[in-house]
Image (cartoon, rainbow, N blue to C red):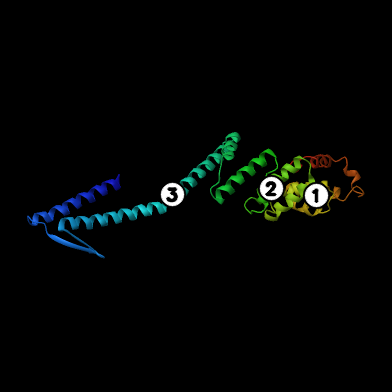
Amino acid sequence: MKSAFTALLVLAILLVVAWLPALWGTAPLPVTLTIDNIVLHTSVPVAIMLVVALLVLTFYLGRLTGWFLRLPGTLLHIRNRKAGQQLIDAYTAYLLEDLTEAQKRLNGFKPDNETHALLADMLRLRDNLDTATMPEKLEKHFAHPSTVVLAAWAGARAAAHQSQWDEVARITAIGREYAPQHLPLRVLQFKALTNLGDPQASTLLPLLKTDLGASNTKLIGQILQGPDATTVRPLLENRFVKDFELWLTTPSEDLPQ
């Protein structure tokens, strides 16, 4: 609307400018225009109109050219805004615990840049974590520092539910390179190494002392010494020891109390 009003105003000024010279006399004022080898004979009003028209045409041609140059950026901005809104809707549905709607939004989501793709991957990984399912393209997520910990947690949890303790040990080791203090990864790694009979499990035990307590940590340390330890036999009837042995067979990330 504003551009149309400006154009009409310019045309009105053009007519006025062309009309004013006619007030100077009854006869048109002659003007000769030479462009290269072309000679044009006209009057002052017509010449003024041609000059002003040329200026107006140049101005609007420049604006049209600028609009075409900005068009790709405008279309990209619209696409970014649409993709961003769809991603916001997916996160909103997830936070409202409407997992079906969140998954629906993600299934139809087409990322338009790396940031949106990364945020969508993180939301999918969170869904894998909640459902204890193995993430797709797990190794790809390990290659990105923003998704490696979440991917390791989701992958380790899924592997633990399948009692694949060798895979749990591998995945948690990758995740703890980036988040060594992450308690669930630490617990799952300790459980996997213990189930595999790996002596490195004893090196992780001191890191769990705060959550286990000193007495329970000592009991587990004695258990990790192996079935031939002289202190193990009296421990077999200990209630915590029984709970611990049962806990080892489960995918639980909560330490036994």
Q: Which of the 4 image quarters holds residue 126? A: top right
Disc 1 packing (10 Å; few <14; some 14–19; many ≥20): many
Q: Which of the 4 image quarters holds residue 177? A: bottom right
First reached walking from the N terminus: tag 3 or tag 1: 3
Q: Are marks 2 and 1 in contact (CB under 8 Å)?
A: no
Tell me the amino acid under the disc marked 3: Thr
Q: Which circle, 2 or 3, is nearer the viewer?
A: 3
Q: Residue at x 60, y 35 (%)?
A: 99
Tell me the amino acid under the disc marked 2: Leu
Q: Residue at x 22, y 56 (%)?
A: 50
In the image, is residue 242 above or below residue 53? Answer: above
User: Where's residue 209, x and y in %?
Assistant: 75, 50
User: Residue 48 has which mark?
Assistant: none
Tell me the amino acid under the disc marked 1: Leu
Residue annotated with mark 3? 74
Residue annotated with mark 2? 138
Q: Are marks 3 and 1 in contact (CB under 8 Å)?
A: no
Mark 2 and mark 3: Cα distance apart in space: 35 Å
User: SS at mark 2?
Assistant: helix
Q: Residue at x 53, y 39 (%)?
A: 89
First reached walking from the N terminus: tag 2 or tag 3: 3
Q: Which circle, 2 or 1, is nearer the viewer?
A: 2
User: Where's residue 74, x and y in %?
Assistant: 43, 49
Residue 15 horizontal side relative to residue 186, left or right: left
Instruction: Answer whether residue 213 is visible to the viewer in this image.
Output: no
User: SS at mark 3?
Assistant: helix
Mark 3 and mark 1: Cα distance apart in space: 55 Å
User: SS at mark 1?
Assistant: helix
Towards the viewer: 225 or 216? 225
Residue annotated with mark 1? 193
